[in-house]
Amino acid sequence: MPTTYTVIRRPLITERALTVKETENTLVFEVAGKATKTEVKQAVEALFKVKVSTVRTANYAGKERRRGRFVGYRPDWKKAYVRLAPGEKMPEYVNSL
């Protein structure tokens, strides 16, 4: 079983993520590509000591990037939307923004 820090890579602090946080009580994370919804749920509950209601995930393909005549691709990545259970308090790192 993967550890908490191998499942959750980093929180996404974007304009859309902050809007979703305030309107839908949802946190947004970049997660490991092979992480399942159950693993993400367990990791968030263990890390932030909150109850999770639902988890939605989305896979993103890496974009093409160029350096002059050399072409490469950014790596593929996965995003998770984690909705907290009703009555749960938002973790501190999000409230300070």
Image: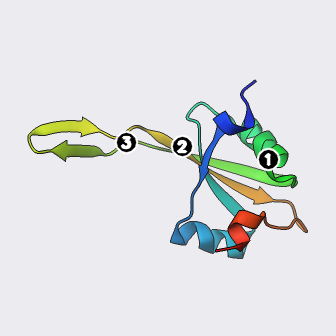
Looking at the image, which residue sits at the far left?
A: 69
- Residue 1 rendering spot, x and y as whole percentages: 76, 24
- Residue 33 rendering spot, x and y as whole percentages: 55, 34
What crowding class fits label 2: few (fewer than 14 Cα within 10 Å), some (14-19), or many (20 or more)? some
Provide the residue designation for mark 2.
78
Q: In this view, does 49 lie above or below 16?
A: above
Q: In this view, does 4 lie above or below 25?
A: above
SS of the residue under disc 1? helix
User: Which residue type does callout 3 highlight?
Assistant: Gly
Query: Could you say which disc has been placed on residue 62 in the image?
Result: 3
Q: Is residue 94 above or below residue 74?
A: below
Of callouts 2 and 1, which one flags the residue occurring earlier in the amino acid sequence?
A: 1
Looking at the image, which residue sits at the far top?
A: 1
State the separation of the CA atoms marked 1 and 3: 28 Å
User: Which residue type does callout 1 highlight?
Assistant: Leu
Q: In this view, does 39 lie above or below 28?
A: above
In the displayed structure image, the side of residue 73 where residue 24 appears, left or right:
right
State the separation of the CA atoms marked 3 and 2: 10 Å
State the separation of the CA atoms marked 2 and 1: 19 Å
Q: Tell me what residue is drawn at x 8 percent, y 40 percent.
A: 69
Is disc 3 in contact with disc 2, using a CB cutoff of under 8 Å?
A: no
Colour scheme of the picture: rainbow
Q: Looking at the rendering, which quadrant does residue 95 occupy?
A: bottom right
40 or 94: which is nearer to us? 94
Of callouts 1 and 3, which one flags the residue occurring earlier in the amino acid sequence?
A: 1
Q: Tell us which disc is closer to us: 2 or 1.
A: 1
What crowding class fits label 1: few (fewer than 14 Cα within 10 Å), some (14-19), or many (20 or more)? few
Q: Tell us which disc is closer to us: 1 or 3.
A: 1
User: Which residue type does callout 2 highlight?
Assistant: Lys
Query: Could you say which disc has been placed on residue 47 in the image?
Result: 1
